[in-house]
């Protein structure tokens, strides 16, 4: 049940609120800086072009059909960043706009956290891609977008120096037992090997042989056929498997109300964009829809995955010392988590 090592810490509380009292100030600051960068400096929000002024004057009305996210740094009382995920229109993909972090709150991961949640929301809506525009001189935002997998595409806005970027989104779908068998020796084995070799404690020691990983997934296929385990996988636009999660159902008569989240894996090349959260939410939603009222899981104590589970509303029930060896063979503590559904 590990995502594997992560390079960035979640340092912000993300909320959706287009009516937040601090949103107008964030949007106003964004537009004032943007106008200055374009060489059309104005001193106050009242002097902004009307198309931008209305956003700062009444964000709730300006973005009534869109998703507005705010980021509050850890330990802070007010949001210091925002982003807007525009609703898809006329068959076009959703568009990310107005990514802004106050200067005093930068270098804390807020922009990346906002982008990860915006991408997660876009993917959860079923959108095949998400797009954005960025001025060519904005080196830091451009570097962030490139790191998240955005690539330059044919422009839909022909303003000089404006780059149009697009990112295809991974698709999450439930795998049939036959599909698990078909992917056992390929994409599924590769996910497990990548996790173990990257340091994730998921029941195997490193280095993990592909044949052993494939055999484990073949066993999962039999459990899926027996109705004991459900499997969901994430596919990249090129068809590669980028993540997987399984839900194990309790077989005892007095435990039919609960299930266990197991083997939540995201490939190292696909981390940092909210895919683990999407897979977890998909499994949770299915568990609730099929009558389960309680989920449990365990994970190595102080692992990066703990932040995901806590952020998704899971409660730590306790820690067991020296519960399992990590891939290098060192005994590590394990923390047990639970989450009530419904």
Image: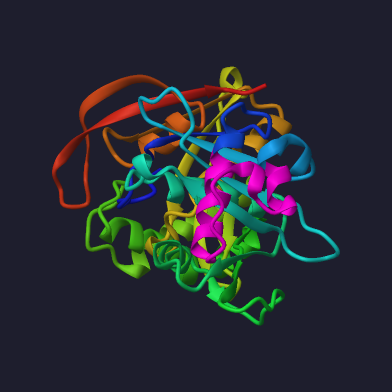
Spot the residue most to the left. Answer: 330
Can residue 246 be seen here? The reply is no
Foreground residue, 276 or 221?
276
Q: Position of residue 243 (x, y in %)?
A: 50, 57
Span colored in magenta: 26-55
Relative to residue 270, is residue 320 drawn left or right? left
Relative to residue 340, is residue 342 drawn left or right? right
Q: Residue at x 45, y 66 (%)?
A: 138
Q: Position of residue 1 (x, y in %)?
A: 40, 43
Colouring used for the render: rainbow
Vertical order, 14 against 197 (above or below): above
Spot the residue most to the right. Answer: 90
Foreground residue, 146 or 33?
33
Task: Find out whether residue 29 is within the magenta segment.
Answer: yes
Q: Position of residue 217 (x, y in %)?
A: 47, 58
Can residue 331 be seen here? The reply is yes
Residue 302 found in image quarter: top left
Foreground residue, 75 or 217?
75
């Amino acid at each position: 049940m590990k995502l594997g090592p992560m390079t960035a810490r979640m340092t912000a509380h993300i909320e959706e609120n287009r009516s937040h009292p601090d949103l107008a100030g964030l949007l106003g600051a964004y537009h004032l800086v943007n106008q200055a960068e374009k060489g059309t400096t104005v001193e106050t929000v009242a002097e902004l072009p009307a198309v931008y002024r209305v956003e700062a004057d009444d964000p709730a009305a300006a973005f009534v059909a869109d998703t507005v996210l705010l980021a509050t740094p850890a330990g802070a009382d007010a949001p210091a960043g925002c982003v807007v995920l525009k609703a898809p229109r006329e068959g076009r993909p959703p568009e990310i706009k107005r990514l802004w972090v106050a200067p005093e709150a930068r270098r804390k991961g807020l922009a990346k956290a906002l982008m990860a949640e915006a991408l997660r929301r876009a993917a959860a809506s079923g959108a095949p891609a998400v797009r954005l525009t960025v001025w060519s001189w904005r080196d830091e935002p451009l570097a962030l977008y490139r790191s998240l997998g955005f690539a330059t595409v044919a422009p839909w806005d022909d303003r000089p120096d404006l780059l149009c970027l697009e990112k295809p989104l991974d698709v999450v779908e439930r795998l049939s037992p036959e599909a698990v068998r078909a992917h056992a020796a390929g994409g599924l084995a590769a996910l497990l090997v990548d996790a173990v070799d990257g340091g994730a404690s998921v029941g195997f020691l490193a280095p993990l042989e592909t044949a052993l990983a494939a055999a484990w997934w073949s066993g999962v296929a039999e459990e899926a056929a027996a109705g004991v385990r459900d499997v969901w996988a994430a596919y990249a636009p090129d068809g590669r498997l980028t993540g997987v999660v399984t839900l194990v159902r309790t077989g005892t008569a007095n435990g039919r109300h609960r299930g266990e989240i197991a083997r939540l894996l995201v490939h190292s090349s696909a981390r940092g964009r909210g895919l683990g959260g999407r897979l977890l939410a998909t499994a949770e939603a299915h568990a609730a829809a099929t009558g389960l009222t309680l989920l449990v899981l365990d994970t190595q104590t102080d692992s990066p995955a703990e932040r995901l589970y806590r952020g998704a509303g899971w409660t730590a029930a306790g820690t067991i010392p020296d519960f399992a060896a990590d891939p290098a063979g060192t005994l590590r503590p394990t923390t047990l988590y639970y989450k009530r559904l419904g």
